[in-house]
Amino acid sequence: MTMNASGTPETENLRVGVDVGGTKIEAVLTDAAGTVLASARKAARKGGDEVVEDAVAIVRQVAGMRFDEVRSVGIGIPGLVHRDTGRVENVVNLGIENLELGGRASGMLGLPVWVDNDVNAAALGAYGTLPDRLRRGRMAFVNLGTGLAAGFVRAGLVERGDTGALGEIGHLPVDPNRMACQCGQRGCLETACSGGGLRRMWPVADPPLPDNLARADGGDGEAERVLGIALHALADVVQIVAQAADPSVIVIGGGVSRAGSPLLDALRGELCNREASSGFIAGLRLTERLRLADASIPIGALGASLIAC
């Protein structure tokens, strides 16, 4: 057992990070140095009461016999998050309009609970996995989960807007296919390239993208059509992020990114096509900025543990 400067055992400074997604909830138990000691996963349920219950349950599950050593909990969740109060609003994919998540979870656990937007938490986790040479400027994290959003980290700090809506690019209604979105608009980017959008367009497989990529590569016309929609939207996302925030690195993460190199290669191909017809786009060097998140690390939950003070 190691000791800190005050002589307190480091094991007394354990933290739990929880990543609440549209289809699953992940959690990690970390020590004072940020080392992952244990992890857990469970299916997500819709509804405010259910999310609170599931978050509290997975904290206790991942901590196990060491729950009494946990000093704080961080929760990342989609939607608009008021970090000062732990209240969340408009979590579309979980059917939540308004939820006092931080206060309710804290009361049930008897621990301080810090809440942040899930993509901000994941961005912080992804930033921590980058080699030092890639941490010199701004990093953008594009989360392709059930929904779509982006987070930004510079010098180890999450960048935030004035209202907490920075990076909510999934609900930009610019996709030309004009598919209906759960937010009430049409043509939102997440209808075309998020996990939820891909499952609606390609319901024959779950997860849809690996199967869709393989069939498109084999010449399946319908697979090529769907893949074309997804790649066009994702390339739009990369352009929007690059031209609005100009990060030195753009990390693609979330469940969809687990398709791995075939996804990255296909996206780079779409961007190369744009570069071939536009000197402006070629000058942005978008393909050189792209990276895939490390799928072996639960970066959302890891980042959530880092926001827990």
Image: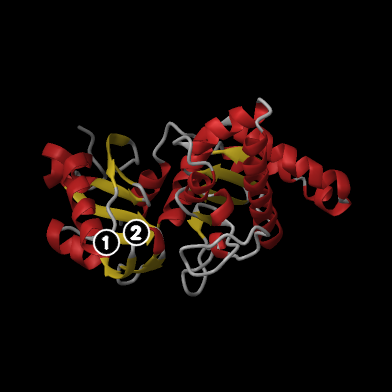
Is 154 situated above or below 287? below
Residue lying furthest top: 218
Residue 9 visible in the picture: no
Callout 1: helix, strand or loop? loop
What amino acid is at disc 1?
Gly
Residue lying furthest bottom: 162
Who's the residue at 19% across and 65% down the image? 104
Who's the residue at 44% across and 36% down the image? 206
Q: Are marks 2 and 1 in contact (CB under 8 Å)?
A: yes
Answer with left or right where residue 34 lies relative to residue 253.
left
Q: According to the image, label 2 marks what residue?
A: 94
The image position of residue 140, as x and y in percent, is: 58, 52
Pick whichever of labels 2 and 1 is earlier in the sequence: 1
The image position of residue 11, as x and y in percent, is: 20, 40
Residue 80 visible in the picture: yes
Q: Which mark is residue 158?
A: none
Callout 2: helix, strand or loop? helix
Instruction: Tell me the crowding category of disc 1: few under 14, some 14 to 19, or many 20 or more residues within 10 angstroms, Cα based.
Output: some
The image position of residue 102, as x and y in percent, is: 26, 64
Q: According to the image, label 1 marks what residue?
A: 47
